[in-house]
Amino acid sequence: MNKVPFKGIIAYPVTPFDYHERVDIPLFKTQVERLVTCGSHGVAPLGSTGVLPYLNDEEKESITEATIQQVAGRVPTLVGVSNLTTDKTIYHAQFAEKAGATAVMIIPMSYWKLTDDEIVAHYDAVASKISIPIMAYNNPATSGVDMSTGLLKKLLMIPNVTMIKESSGDIQRMHILKNELGDDVAFFNGSNPLALGAFAAGAQGWCTAAPNLIPELNMSLYQAVLENDFQKAQEIFYKQVDLLRFIVDKGLPRSIKSGLNLLGFEGGELRRPLMPLAESEIAALNSILTGLHAGVEA
Amino acid sequence: MNKVPFKGIIAYPVTPFDYHERVDIPLFKTQVERLVTCGSHGVAPLGSTGVLPYLNDEEKESITEATIQQVAGRVPTLVGVSNLTTDKTIYHAQFAEKAGATAVMIIPMSYWKLTDDEIVAHYDAVASKISIPIMAYNNPATSGVDMSTGLLKKLLMIPNVTMIKESSGDIQRMHILKNELGDDVAFFNGSNPLALGAFAAGAQGWCTAAPNLIPELNMSLYQAVLENDFQKAQEIFYKQVDLLRFIVDKGLPRSIKSGLNLLGFEGGELRRPLMPLAESEIAALNSILTGLHAGVEA
Amino acid sequence: MNKVPFKGIIAYPVTPFDYHERVDIPLFKTQVERLVTCGSHGVAPLGSTGVLPYLNDEEKESITEATIQQVAGRVPTLVGVSNLTTDKTIYHAQFAEKAGATAVMIIPMSYWKLTDDEIVAHYDAVASKISIPIMAYNNPATSGVDMSTGLLKKLLMIPNVTMIKESSGDIQRMHILKNELGDDVAFFNGSNPLALGAFAAGAQGWCTAAPNLIPELNMSLYQAVLENDFQKAQEIFYKQVDLLRFIVDKGLPRSIKSGLNLLGFEGGELRRPLMPLAESEIAALNSILTGLHAGVEA
Amino acid sequence: MNKVPFKGIIAYPVTPFDYHERVDIPLFKTQVERLVTCGSHGVAPLGSTGVLPYLNDEEKESITEATIQQVAGRVPTLVGVSNLTTDKTIYHAQFAEKAGATAVMIIPMSYWKLTDDEIVAHYDAVASKISIPIMAYNNPATSGVDMSTGLLKKLLMIPNVTMIKESSGDIQRMHILKNELGDDVAFFNGSNPLALGAFAAGAQGWCTAAPNLIPELNMSLYQAVLENDFQKAQEIFYKQVDLLRFIVDKGLPRSIKSGLNLLGFEGGELRRPLMPLAESEIAALNSILTGLHAGVEA
């Protein structure tokens, strides 16, 4: 087992629907293909961007299989298998492993705020049933639970919990993670507008839906970091920060789909209650994208 | 259609599981029976207390049917049918209506923060498919969305959205609701520790899991309110407030099940990741319950 | 020493300035006189309403003396003596005692967040230098420190700290105070929009600037509470809640002064940076006041 | 007027007291001298670190004069002149200018939450009375007001408001400032634990009390930034981040004074209610400092 099979830009596809709110697998494969060919260092289906919680079991399985088929080993895959119950999480983690996923990502979804003991037991139960690595994902805004550094430490003692994705939006968390967990802990940034600060803090990668819209800017930011070029990284980051903030503020599925349409690609439909961006929001997004692509060409 | 078929104490049963994490319908019926015979003015299965989001479709249907059979029309029933997607919410709302529910309760569950337009469209879509009343439920802590008074006003313009359950924990919301929506808007309190303040503010009822443990204190608080006896209401409220705060702090399913066991009833098991209260917590709960029941007898 | 010399409505005067931003003592006395003659059960100068922190030492002393002269023993006086440093707090507390104040109010002002030990030592140092009672005031929004129930317990062990004013805006604090500190702890409500809930919770009094504008409604709410008439209290409360919320939202000094002017009294000027309400805000306040006074007469 | 006379590390001295809580000017000068000789690029007395709000007018004036005498033009000086009232802020700003300060720093202190109009009028009134540059300081935790980017834009239209110090702790604010205000806006970081991220985001300098304890680490971080060496900056930052977090968590005056004592310098006393760190806190600080200085030598 490669304990940390990811680095760089891990791209998150959306899950497109057709007009009857059915998952559109062919369109999904097209979108995944774009993410691979544009240079992403990994592909991560069934994340928040992929509206994981709005899908039923069969749909999740189709998306998992479609991803692995389409990626075809060109880059590693990170499949989201989070579920409110432990049993269902185990079920989907095992499905992903069998289907050939490189690793799985798990956020401790909660309706009732979970205790630390419940969270450890949850990860432990899932980890004991699979042999591929697990990325533990902290995002209090969507999970309702903010995992402390102390709790993350405990999770990292489970042998195949080897990576952490931090999306609390607080850069200090990464400092504490790195200082308390040692240099070899692999943490990934999941907060788009913090991309620059997170790389400065030592993040090994950036989990992001932005490559659906601006892959060159995302890849070149990472390239500048690899080249240890602070000023270039800053310059590239400031070109994209308005877009990064927009897609987070308006919600990733809605804004990525609108953005794809604006760029001339097919974005697909949403599943209710999610609705398309309003006209004024689409105009704002268009203005940002137009500015960016002009800037990139220049 | 009786637009507001509830008043007083609306009791929330837990959903008990057996040792294999399967829903235990016979035990559930026993627990519902206790809630009816102790004098509750309504029964509300599949709420947060009933761990709605942890159940699959078949389980939700069994619980709905079991409730309606057991209650057998003695009091009105309020069935939780909330779901992340609009289609599934419609599905369960229709099921509940066919099964004979008096009304349904809907909270705008969200993973991606919903816009006001998305929420209105969600309720509208469900409401148009059923003819029983809907209680709109605001609880930002569990839904991730805090519905403003302005939004609630819009929801109340949908003909069968006739009731509001407020659980934001801010008593001022009820003042604004009553002042802006007029005297005839029926709002219910869903925040246990605010029970007294909410009745003072004019709440028509109290949605609570507490009757599983202390039905006499819950019913007599409401009785004092009906009798316009401020001082008696205050005295009765202060007897129960520690318990009310405990069950909220520790989570309703976990604490109600432990409390049932402590009182000599069968509480049933939980579904993972939820785990029983720790020993020290059970001891604290026991101490509160012992004090209360001594106090009630005295 | 009467340990708890207050009950009912404790009225807070503003500190009026002239056009040169000098304190206007004659106008202040006129305003205090109105508060006494309208039936307030106590008068409390140099609170937040009285812009205590914007005044220099001499101005505070003049206001203290003017209050005590004007009230002339008709009701008890509660003088604000809070200061960032312990030495200055002692200084003003001693001045108030010598001038004849019935009691002093102290909030733990902080620039640097104080520890519990620092707060206890602060109250202890002041209390040891005076022999009149102290009301400890919790208002995290203005002091920057939220005193826990545990800390308030410690403060109440200091012999002349005998009263608590709670303005955190969370009604549950009052429940905890009463349940943990026993029936004889005297707590006062300082959050205007919570007036009804606080009386329901057992508050002994209401610290409020509202009697500057709507004394009859404030007094009659307390009267209904004394008469144990829940329904009447609710009805009277709902008449005034919009005004209570307005004066809190817009700031007490600014809104009370505008309100006085609207009612035909002289409100006085503000000291910069505080500026008068905007025209649209004054119109909104006028609309609320007009509605109220129509309602009162009817 | 040099509109932006600062860059790099702007060092904040504490205000030391003697055993009678009197300001100790000779000790203050010794501490300022250390900050200059260790290579700081500016000195900023009467900030939060210097317990500005706990000092009376005469004390502020002595500190201002002592700083300017001791620094003697070797580096620029930035004098804190913030006050709750506009008149007093003008008074101290004029005093600082006459005494020879390079610039003044102003935070919109508030007791009553100020409106945007009040804040603009406040800065405008002060700015019109002096001719040296003003650094507008945003720190909601101490001022009680969070100035939006829109408001900061308005302040920057006042001719001598030329610099912004951002201490909200949210790195995204700096992104927005830079993107909305243009490349030539000079913003400074005031949040110690964000030092690395802020330089990555383009901050022109770092306002910090840390040079009292670890000047070499602070200066060398800035040096690495100037050299465009990402990896070196990260390495140097991680050496100091635990100390940076400690001094913020425990309060700058208390922790800097204890740290000075631990390093063998004289820290001076505090003014009540501020009290020295507890023994266990001093031990923790000692452990951090010992580790750091070992690390620096190695």
Image (spheres, coloured by chain):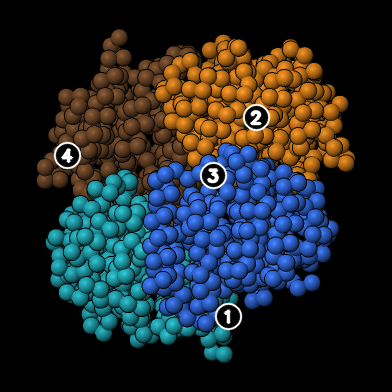
Chain colours: A blue, B orange, C brown, D cyan
Tell me the tag on residue B110.
none
Chain for disc number 1: D
Q: Are marks 3 and 4 in contact (CB under 8 Å)?
A: no
Secondary structure type for disc 3: loop
Distance, label 2 to label 4, CA atoms, is: 59 Å
Distance, label 3 to label 4, CA atoms, is: 45 Å
Distance, label 4 to label 1, CA atoms, is: 57 Å
Q: Which residue is mark 1?
A: D291
Q: Please rate how many residues cluster around mark 1, counting C-alpha atoms within 10 Å: few if below 14, some from 14 to 19, many from 20.
A: few
Residue mark closest to the camera, 2 vs 3? 2
Tell me the tag on residue C269.
4
Secondary structure type for disc 2: helix
Secondary structure type for disc 4: loop
Distance, label 2 to label 3, CA atoms, is: 20 Å
Chain for disc number 2: B
**Amino acid carrying mark 2 in the image:** Ile
Tell me the tag on residue B90.
2
**In the rendered image of this protein, does residue D66 appear above or below residue B258?**
below
Q: Residue at x 55, y 28 (%)?
A: B124
Q: Please rate how many residues cluster around mark 2, counting C-alpha atoms within 10 Å: few if below 14, some from 14 to 19, many from 20.
A: many
Among the two numbered marks 2 and 3 on one chain, the one whose residue lies closer to the N terminus = 2
Determine the residue located farthest toward the bottom in the rendered image.
Answer: D298
**Amino acid carrying mark 4 in the image:** Glu
Task: Check chain identity for marks 2 and 4: say if they share one.
Answer: no
Secondary structure type for disc 1: helix
Q: Quadrant of the C terminus of chain B?
A: top right
